[in-house]
Image (cartoon, grey):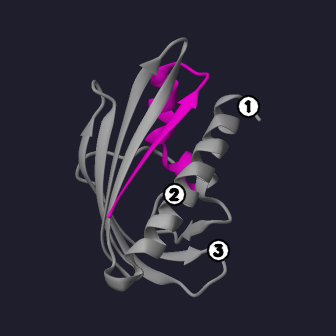
């Protein structure tokens, strides 16, 4: 199943890209939704080839589940990346992200392909909610809110 989302930001594309690839921002936009253990750095940025084998806790409270995230592709000049993820009941979670100019600001276009057996529709619903909330929080980070 594929989920496609577009989010607009009143910030220059380079700032939105910097946020989308910042590990500290990842933790901030996921706070209360998904918590990562300390095997995911708290600072720095993602790079092509990075692999994080970590524990994730939904809502920061449920028991930790094993999860693997690999930054399979990252192109700073095109402002695109693709991550391949699995674990916590998900066989495959492929996340593609692109930052594009949009008028005086920028937009993020995301595509998430999910394979989770019978749970795939539920995971797709979760993806829509998760990425929409992350975009709202990213807007606040970018505007200093």
Q: CA distance from mark 1 to mark 3?
A: 24 Å
Number of the label disc, if any, that sits on residue 144: 1
Q: Position of residue 33 (x, y in %)?
A: 62, 66
Which residue matches tag 2?
Answer: 128
Q: Secondary structure at mark 3?
A: loop
First in sequence: mark 1 vs mark 3: 3
Q: Position of residue 4 (x, y in %)?
A: 40, 48
Q: Residue extending furthest right?
A: 145
First in sequence: mark 2 vs mark 3: 3
Side of 93 relative to 72 (left or right): right
Q: Position of residue 55 (x, y in %)?
A: 47, 77
Q: How many marks?
A: 3
What residue sits 58% from the left and 59% below the top?
129
- Does 89 sit above or below residue 84? below
Foreground mark, 1 or 2, reads: 2
Residue range of the region highlighted in magenta in the rendering: 1-27
Q: Nearer the viewer, residue 97 or 119?
A: 119
Q: Secondary structure at mark 2?
A: helix
What residue sits 52% from the left and 67% below the top?
126
Q: CA distance from mark 2 to mark 3?
A: 19 Å
Side of 89 relative to 73 (left or right): right
């Amino acid at each position: 199943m594929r989920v496609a989302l577009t989010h607009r930001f009143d910030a220059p594309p380079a700032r939105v890209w910097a946020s989308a690839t910042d590990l500290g921002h990842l933790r901030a936009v996921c706070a209360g939704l998904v918590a990562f253990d300390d095997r995911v750095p708290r600072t720095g940025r993602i790079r092509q080839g990075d692999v994080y084998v970590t524990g994730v806790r939904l809502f920061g409270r449920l028991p930790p589940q094993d999860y693997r995230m690999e930054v399979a592709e990252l192109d700073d000049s095109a402002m695109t990346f693709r991550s391949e993820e699995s674990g916590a009941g998900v066989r495959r979670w492929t996340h593609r992200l692109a930052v594009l100019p949009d008028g005086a600001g920028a937009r993020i276009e995301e595509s998430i392909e999910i394979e989770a057996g019978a749970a795939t529709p539920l995971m797709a619903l979760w993806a829509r909610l998760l990425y929409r909330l992350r975009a709202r929080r990213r807007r606040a980070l970018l505007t200093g809110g």
